[in-house]
């Protein structure tokens, strides 16, 4: 494994920005500081004043393998991820077959060991009948248990109250929830069908997947967690209404935490007019007041993590009418540039973006030796040029589906280079290394 020396970088790490060098040997950061030009290196990267960040750890992606590989697979989507500065991902269980037993978990790990360009971990999906599989999970290998408290794939809607009580009482790992109330959504769908038939306009999506559906389900999850002392992580918040459920205390002091996704910080319901089903996702993109409230919650600490919920579908699938068009967006390649837009607007400082996409994820999930630029830690890094604009060209997305919800948008920043485990895996549009991701390990007692 080659030794790398990164010089003249603006290092964004642990709530500050400093100028200096980083020396990497055997995949880890061995020295960090001022002038390290005397260190022996096989490759020297002159950052020339660009910003060096810890690689993003994305705690919520859907890479579609096995069973849905016409949309994406672990190889294609992790390749797109490293092009976007994401060096580790945690993948969701709603594949075919669903990841709801230990054998399915091991099968995914085996696929990733051969094909993942980034480091990886997988959630076990909860069902109404697999509590024994949940209870016997190895907390050192599994990132969490995913509970769909809203409509989902196959048998993964957990709607039995007794089962929910058992999951929240007995899970040995973080319980991560998708919170939307299914009966509320079904009633809303019926109401809009009466008015529009099958041709419901896309702008009705946030009224169907409504704030009431989100708040009712999130409130239930938080209540269960409080009663059972569960380590709960509520995924992809979308409404101002839900924010009162969460504390502004530091992440390390909370047992109930929350996430927002990059697209919910960027788009609002006015964008359905131009983006249509391309921004159809669950939970739905909602109003501008919600978007502003979510940004403020990132700043004040009610929201602990920013993720992607990367969920690709083909354009052909997306071009169906409302009820047939699937929900989900490909986001891993463009999430970081979209977040850097908030920096340019003076809303999110660079250290706060790093905190929410790397540091907090590592702490919240107890990821071992990653998520920070520290001596002794694995060298998972991304070099960004915050002053090099680029336009998202239609049809040029690296994800297998070949499109982005940001198609045509001009970002003010660009990802120049990504390092995973001390190796350059992406540089200026090229992928110089074969897949070399490894399984994430967790430091838990």
Image: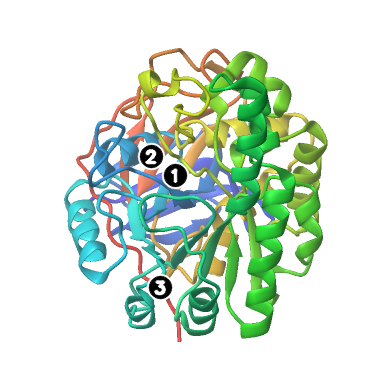
Q: Please tell me which of labels 2 and 3 falls first in the chain.
A: 2
Image quarter for residue 442? bottom left
Q: Which residue is mark 3?
A: 442
Q: Please tell me which of labels 1 and 3 falls first in the chain.
A: 1
Task: Kindly tell me whether residue 50 is visible in this rendering.
Answer: no
Image quarter for residue 291? top right
Question: Which secondary structure, mark 2?
Answer: helix
x, y percentage for residue 20? 56, 48
Specify the color scheme: rainbow
Determine contact: label 2, label 1, CB under 8 Å. yes
Question: Which secondary structure, mark 1?
Answer: strand
Whether residue 206 sits left or right of residue 163 in the image: it is right
x, y percentage for residue 365? 50, 68
Q: Residues within 10 Å of mark 1 (few under 14, many from 20)?
A: many
**Residue at (31, 64) in percent of width and height:** 100
Res. 86 mark: 1
Q: Which residue is mark 2?
A: 82
**Residue at (63, 14) in percent of width and height:** 274
229 or 221, which is in the foreground? 221
x, y percentage for residue 180? 61, 52
**Residue at (47, 51) in percent of width and height:** 60
160 to 55, vertically: above or below:
below
202 or 34, which is in the foreground? 202
Whether residue 164 sits left or right of residue 153 in the image: it is right
């Amino acid at each position: 494994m080659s030794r790398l020396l990164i010089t003249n970088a603006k290092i964004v790490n642990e709530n500050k920005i400093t100028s200096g060098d980083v020396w990497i040997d055997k995949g880890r950061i061995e020295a960090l500081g001022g002038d390290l030009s005397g260190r022996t290196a096989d490759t020297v990267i002159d950052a020339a004043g660009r910003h060096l960040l810890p690689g993003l750890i994305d705690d919520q992606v859907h890479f579609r393998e096995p069973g849905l590989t016409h949309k994406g697979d672990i190889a294609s989507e992790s390749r797109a991820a490293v092009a976007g500065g994401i060096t580790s991902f945690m993948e969701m269980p709603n594949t075919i077959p669903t990841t709801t037993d230990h054998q399915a978990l091991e099968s995914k790990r085996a696929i990733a060991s051969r094909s993942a360009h980034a480091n990886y971990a997988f959630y076990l999906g909860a069902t109404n009948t697999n509590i024994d599989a949940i209870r016997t999970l190895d907390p050192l290998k599994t990132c969490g248990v995913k509970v769909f408290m809203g409509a989902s794939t196959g048998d993964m809607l957990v709607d039995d109250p007794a089962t929910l009580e058992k999951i929240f009482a007995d899970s040995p790992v973080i319980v991560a929830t998708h919170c939307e109330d299914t009966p509320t959504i079904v009633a809303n769908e019926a109401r809009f069908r009466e008015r529009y038939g099958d041709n419901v306009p896309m702008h009705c999506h946030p009224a169907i997947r409504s704030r009431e559906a989100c708040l009712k389900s999130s409130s239930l999850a938080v209540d269960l967690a409080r009663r059972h002392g569960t380590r709960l992580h509520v995924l992809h918040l979308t409404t101002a209404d839900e924010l009162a459920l969460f504390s502004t205390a530091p992440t390390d002091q909370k047992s109930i935490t929350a996430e927002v996704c990059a697209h919910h910080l960027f788009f609002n319901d006015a964008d359905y007019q131009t983006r249509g089903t391309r921004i159809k996702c669950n939970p739905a993109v909602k109003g501008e007041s919600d978007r502003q409230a979510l940004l403020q919650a990132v700043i004040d600490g009610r929201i602990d993590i920013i993720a992607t919920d990367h969920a690709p579908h083909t354009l052909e699938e997306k071009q169906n009418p409302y009820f047939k068009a699937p929900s989900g967006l490909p986001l891993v390649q463009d999430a970081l540039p979209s977040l850097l837009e908030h920096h340019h607007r003076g809303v999110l400082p660079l250290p706060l973006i790093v905190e929410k996409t790397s540091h907090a994820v590592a702490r919240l999930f107890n990821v071992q030796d990653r998520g920070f630029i520290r001596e002794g830690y694995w060298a998972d890094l991304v070099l960004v040029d915050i002053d090099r604009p680029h336009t998202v060209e239609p049809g040029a997305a690296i994800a297998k589906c070949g499109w982005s919800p940001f198609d045509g948008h001009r970002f003010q920043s660009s990802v120049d280079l990504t390092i995973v485990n001390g190796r350059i895996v992406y540089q200026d549009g090229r992928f110089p290394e074969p897949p070399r991701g490894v399984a994430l390990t967790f430091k838990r007692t």
